[in-house]
Image (cartoon, rainbow, N blue to C red):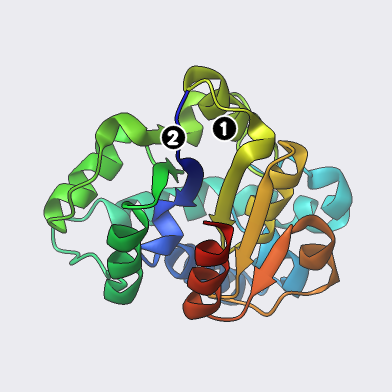
């Protein structure tokens, strides 16, 4: 069992800008088809999985016909050989620093081969053995499957894992896994739902960094 504290990060949002890409596609679909998407949907239920659809039953019926189209457009964008990955260099710097103090693991919503290609294209070197995909589990976030799978395979107690995420789905999944979910306000300010599920929430990357240093 590792002697370092375990820090888990969602690559798609922390290094790349994939959350914004998916959101913009949904907004374009809404404009094209005259749909009205609520802030709740755009904040936490923008993905194609929507396991918690019973909470948005009325809205889900409206957007259901477009889920496949959104996913197809999204895959076309992130798989494009013409697309230069939008990298958050300050986040990448922090990642390299944290690697000295934490046992780092990474979550992606892409297939493993796809995220490997993106990382290679961006010339980012990570331990591929420490990358887990939500495609490898039955239920994606906001269910806890991916974190519980990581904990089981790496012999880590879920309640010792620190999980950094920038979405409502991410902190919900952390909460359900009984892990310490840290919310970083990259795309939205923490509302009451985020505050209810997050172990702690931060407005800036430096705030997260200071908190992690305190833990050590």
Q: Choose between 19 and 145: the one closer to the eye.
A: 145
Residue denoted by label 1: 146
Q: CA distance from mark 1 to mark 2?
A: 7 Å
**In the displayed structure image, the side of residue 204 where residue 74 appears, left or right:** left
Could you say whether the residue bearing mark 2 is in a helix, strand or loop? strand
In the rendered view, does 107 fall on the left or right side of 27?
Answer: left
Q: Based on the displayed image, in which of its 4 quarters is residue 63 positioned?
A: bottom right
At which x and y percent is residue 136?
47, 25
Height in image: 82 above or below 145? Answer: below
Q: Give the SS element for disc 1.
A: helix
Task: State the image coordinates of residue 35 (x, y, percent, origin top left).
Answer: 69, 71
Residue appearing at x 68%, y 80% in the figure: 189
Q: Residues within 10 Å of mark 1 (few under 14, many from 20)?
A: many
Q: Position of residue 208 (x, y in %)?
A: 54, 70
The image's mark for residue 133 is 2
Q: Residue at x 63, y 38 (%)?
A: 160
Report the residue at 33% width, 52% height from top.
99
Which residue appears at 63% of the width and 42% of the height?
141
Q: Can you see residue 28?
A: no
In this orientation, which residue lies closer to the viewer: 23 or 182?
Answer: 182
In contact (CB < 8 Å): disc 1 and disc 2: yes
């Amino acid at each position: 069992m590792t002697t370092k504290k375990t820090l888990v990060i969602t690559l798609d949002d922390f290094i790349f800008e994939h959350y914004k890409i998916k959101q913009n596609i949904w907004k374009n679909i809404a404009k094209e088809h005259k749909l009205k998407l609520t802030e709740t949907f755009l904040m936490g239920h923008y993905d194609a999985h929507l396991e918690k659809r019973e909470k948005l039953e009325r809205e889900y019926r409206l957007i259901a016909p477009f889920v496949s189209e959104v996913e197809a457009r999204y895959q076309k964008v992130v798989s494009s050989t013409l697309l230069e990955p939008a990298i958050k260099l300050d986040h990448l710097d922090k990642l390299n620093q944290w690697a000295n103090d934490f046992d780092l693991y990474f979550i992606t919503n892409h297939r493993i081969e796809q995220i490997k290609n993106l990382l290679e294209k961006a010339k980012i070197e990570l331990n591929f053995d420490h990358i887990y995909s939500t495609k490898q589990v039955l239920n994606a976030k906001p269910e806890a499957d991916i974190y519980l799978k990581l904990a089981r395979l790496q012999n880590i107690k879920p309640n010792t894992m620190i999980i950094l995420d920038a979405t409502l789905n991410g902190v919900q999944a952390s909460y359900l896994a009984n892990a310490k979910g840290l919310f970083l306000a990259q795309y939205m300010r923490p509302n009451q739902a985020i505050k209810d599920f997050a172990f702690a929430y931060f407005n800036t990357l430096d705030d997260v960094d200071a908190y992690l240093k305190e833990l050590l």
